[in-house]
Amino acid sequence: MRILVATDGGADAKRAAAWLTGFPLPASAAVRVVSVATLPPSPIDIPPVRDYHRALLGFAEAATKQVCGQLAPRWPRAEARVLEGEPREQIVREAETWPADLVVVGA
């Protein structure tokens, strides 16, 4: 079984991950936690823009690590991935290409 957990670091996503830990699923399930960073396009490549993009990616990485930590008692091998793009598209694409049996998201 494959479980895809999408997080934006918000309270709803954290509650969804907490709900998942109590759901009767096998401990052998493969779990992938994703967060999607939407990097706004910029016509110029200057340090402040690059710093902003790095900050967005860093926030997404921190969100995935937090959820992986939350899931660790049940799924210590949960993997974290940061994707770039539009969240709705990237989450669906990841669920299809990985392929996930269950997708967990917050409201």
Image (tube, grey):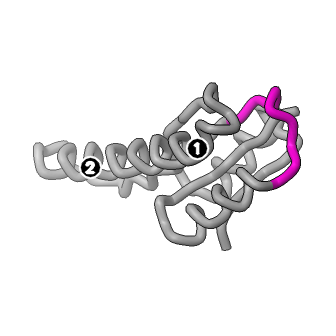
- Where is residue 11? Give x, y as percent: 52, 70
Would you name the residue on which mark 2 appears? Answer: 55
- Where is residue 61? Give x, y as percent: 41, 42
Q: Is residue 29 magenta?
A: yes
Q: Is residue 32 left or right of residue 45?
A: right
Q: Determine the residue positioned at 47% across, 60% down.
A: 9
User: Sequence order check: which comes first, mark 2 or mark 1?
Assistant: 1
> 15 or 7, which is in the foreground?
15
Q: Determine the residue positioned at 51% across, 41% down.
A: 69
- Where is residue 37? Give x, y as percent: 45, 51
Would you name the residue on which mark 1 appears? Answer: 34
Say what secondary structure mark 2 lies in. Answer: helix
Q: Determine the residue positioned at 67% across, 53% down.
A: 89
Question: Disc 2 marks which amino acid?
Answer: Ala
> 10 or 21, which is in the foreground?
21
Q: Total label count? A: 2
Magenta segment: 23-31
